[in-house]
Every structure is written in C-alpha cells, then in structure tokens.
Amino acid sequence: MVDAKGRNMKCLTFLLMLPESVKSKSSKSSKKGSPSSSSKLPPVCYEIITLKTKKKKKMAAEIFPTKKPASATTVQQYQQQNLNNNNTIQCCNWQGLYSTIRERNAVMFNNELMADIHFVVGQSGGTEMLPGHKYVLAVGSSVFHAMFYGELAEDKDEIRIPDVEPPAFLAMLKYIYCDEIDLSADTVLATLYAAKKYIVPHLARACVNFLETSLSAKNACILLSQSCLFEEPDLTQRCWEVIDAQAELALKSEGFCDIDAQTLESILRRETLNAKEIVVFEAALSWAEAECQRREMNTTIDNKRKVLGQAVYLIRIPTIGLDDFANGAAQSGVLTLNETNDIFLWYTAAKKPELQFACQPRKGLTPQKCHRFQSCAYRSNQWRYRGRCDSIQFAVDKRVFIAGFGLYGSSCGSAEYTAKIELKRQGVVLGTNLSKYFSDGSSNTFPVCFEYPVQIEPDTFYTASVVLDGNELSYFGQEGMTEVQCGKVTFQFQCSSDSTNGTGVQGGQIPELIFYA
C-alpha cells in the first residue's frame, strides 16, 4: 500500500472471527444483491488460514518467547550517554530491551525523550539545562509532587535552581530514576543539600553514611559545620569524636580554615579538645587570615584581630607554656600591649591580674586501656628483645582512636629501652613512632604513644608491632584473652605473622592498647 505522501506501507491481514449472525446476514445480502445491505456492512477481505489443532494447549510463554534482558553493559551505556547529555536512543523498540520497569525508567534519566519539564541548574555563568519527567519526579519526591500536581502548582516549562550544583542535582535525579546511589567525596555535601531540599530521605541517609565512613581529621571540622546546617545530630557527634581525639590534626587541616565563625567558636570553647593550647592559638590565626581573604580584607594584624572578635578570648592563652607564649603568642601582634603585659604578670607575679582569657587548662580526653593478659611473669631465660619484633593483631566493634601501647619493662632493676612502635592495616603503616622509655624494675606497664592518635574502624583487623632494644630481661604477659570488653568497646585478638620474638595471643609483649573512644 502507498499512503498520501507516497510512502510504502506494510499491510497486515488478520483472520476475523465474525459472529454467526453477521455471517448469515452477509450471505443473505449477497444473494439478494441489495445495495442498501452492502452499505450497512463494510466490505471485508478474508484470508483463509488453516490451523492444525493439538490436544495440548500452548502457554503464552511458549508462543511468545521472552526476549533476553538488556545486559548490564547496555544499561550502563545508556546511563553514561544520559550523563553526557547524549540522549539518542538508537533502537525504536528500546522498551523491549529491558525486562524491568526500573531499567526502562533508567533510560529516561537525563533524557529529552518525552521530557515535560526542564531545570536550569547552577549559578549564573555555570548553569546546565537538565530535562525531567514530572510523573517520575513526583513519585520520587514530595516536593516535586507539590510543585507539579499540588494546589499551588505552576505551569512552567523551565524551573531555575541556582542554589544546587549540577553534579549534585544529577546525582539526585539518578537516584530517583535509576534507584542508584552514586556519591563521591567532591559532590556528597552538595548532594546531601539537594536531597534535604527536595525531601529524598533515603538518599540523604546514604549521604550521611558516606560522610561518616569517610570522616577523618582532615575533613571533620568542615563536616561539623555542614552537619549543624543540615541538622544531622549523629554526624555532628561523630565529627566531635574525631575532633576531640585528633584535635591537633584537625586544627592543622585545610578544612579548619574554611569553617564559619560560629563553628570556630564552638571548637575553641570545647573542653575535651585534646590539643596543646599553642596549637589552638596558631590554628585560630590561620583561620583569621583565611577569613580576611573571604571578606576581601588585607591580611593585616589588626584585621586578623578584628575578624576573630570575641573568639580570641576563648583561646586559653595563659595555659600556654611561658616559653611558647614569649616566642609565639606575645610576638604575634594579635594581642594588645596591655593583654601581653597582663599575661606576663599572670605567669610571674605573686598577685595575678584579672584576665579576660580562660586560665584553666582544657580537660582533654581521658585515655582508656585495654589489658589483654590476666597475669605477668619473668624467668631467667626470657624475655629478651635485641631488635626482634613483637606483634599482635586486633579488631574492635566500634570506632576508636589508638593513642599508643603499654609495654613491659625490665625485670632486673631499672633500665632504659628504645621502642619503635607501629600500627598497620593490611600492610599499610598508619602510625609509627621511635622513642625511649625508662623502666623502674616493676611489673607495671609503661606508655609509649604515637605523635597523633590513629583512627581505627570497626570490624577490621589491625596489626600492632613494637621493636624493643634493651639488654635487660623483661616481664612478659601470660594467660592472654582472645576477647576483652573495655567499657562499650569489644577488642578481639589474634596472632600476627609479623611477630618474630614469640608474642602471641596467649603471652608476650604489648600487654595494653591505649585508646580514646
């Protein structure tokens, strides 16, 4: 057949099963040759098809074999095309490629096909036009439902969203269309903002989980400010745990300089901050310099003091050692002459002047100890060191921060040991320190600490090692335990292949793990 435009059309002929009454009327009409009868019934073209009947009826699945579902590679290719705004669907029957509604929905993600709304996302100068489908969006978000189908819905072709970054908006759309969560360290905060704004709770929860698992001293301060903004108390608490335990690392991080003034004050006010006060003072100066740049002010001493404002009095300057104060804070220029003079008098004079600064040191965190032996002993033929490694593996059920190890000392009177301690995870060194400690000849343990506490994640085995060098015989542990409960934290121990001096679960060195929780 040829249509009105001259295009070739395929004609499909079907076997029509007509009722007996129609058949009889048709036959009678043909006999009579009545023209009126022919006008009532349209001419019908019949094709006689002979079907061989069988006793057993075939099921629909046998007659119409199911097409193979689209491969994961094909789905990924379409999604990648959509992410790149390359939305061309190459197959006219693309619906048949996918066996589930989720896969078919995924094809519509960032696709112009059947799009009935467009979003102009991003700030001026960096916007992106993203297509959407009102029904899909309304199913995924109550905000979109109100926007498109609510009582106050507006009939617009474009919606401007200047406060969301395009990659974050795309990540949210991908979750709504594809039921997939695609997060990265660069976009997770912006994605969390989008998920909160459009009330997509499961995506928001996934963002928070991602942030909690990737939380470290480097990003804890900036995440603290964001968690308060997003009203996520669990994430806020996690941030404080990291900041308290690894305070000096957190204060020296680049992220600390990016926090807002309110978050700065909350950190400077923190009683459990585990840091030297001179480090707190230097961090505050670094923040002030960055704040001057954000406000487009010259980074002069006067401007630094100006942007710090009353927060400067939250730094406990009188608790800094006299030498550190004289060589650091006193010469920084941030303090006035009267403040500098009064603090010097507070250090040295019998009658101390009143200060606006807090004069009591921070309490910091109280370290806890996990002791893995039930007793200790010594014998004349052991325990010797001479540069051999003592090692043990451990795991915890909650995040903790290992500050160092408690080690045994000499069993033959006072002695000095050189200790190299190390903490590893799957062969990667997380912390190490070389130091000396003095043993008084008792069976007590003696702490040897890392420069900074090391963050330990739950349900993963870590290796604690020490190489001791000393001529004297030492105490050693006995009756070791494979599991130890310390407050709310459970430690599990197992032998380490790194141990070359006899230390294991049942006995040996490294009797204690010193930690914060």
Image (spheres, grey):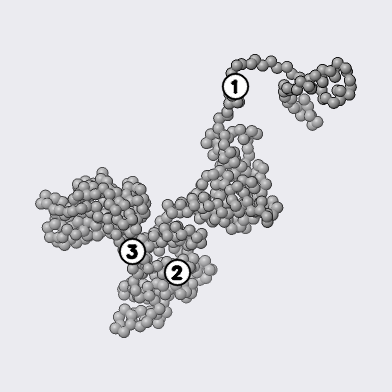
> What residue do we see at 40% from left, 63% from top?
251
Q: Which residue is mark 2?
A: 265
Tag 1 and tag 2, C-beta contact below 8 Å = no
Q: Which residue is mark 3?
A: 365
Residue 176 visible, this orientation = yes
Q: Secondary structure at mark 1?
A: loop
- Indicate which disc, 1 or 2, sits on the residue closer to the N terminus: 1
- Indicate which disc, 3 or 2, sits on the residue closer to the N terminus: 2
Identity of the residue furthest to the front in this view: 21
Pointer 1: residues within 10 angstroms few (<14), some, or many (20+)? few
- Indicate which disc, 3 or 1, sits on the residue closer to the N terminus: 1
Drawn side of residue 171 relative to residue 400, left or right = right
**Viewer-nearest of labels 1 and 2?**
1
The answer to whether residue 351 is above or below residue 152 is below
Query: Which of 435/502 is in front?
Result: 502
Q: Which residue is mark 1?
A: 58
**Residue 181: image location, x then y, percent:** 51, 46
**Residue 81: image location, x then y, percent:** 58, 41
What's the CA distance linking mark 3 and mark 1? 76 Å
Q: Secondary structure at mark 2?
A: helix
Q: Secondary structure at mark 3?
A: loop
> What residue do we see at 69% from left, 15% from top?
50
> What residue do we see at 50% from left, 69% from top?
292
Q: Which image quarter holds the C terminus? A: bottom left
Identity of the residue furthest to the left in this view: 380
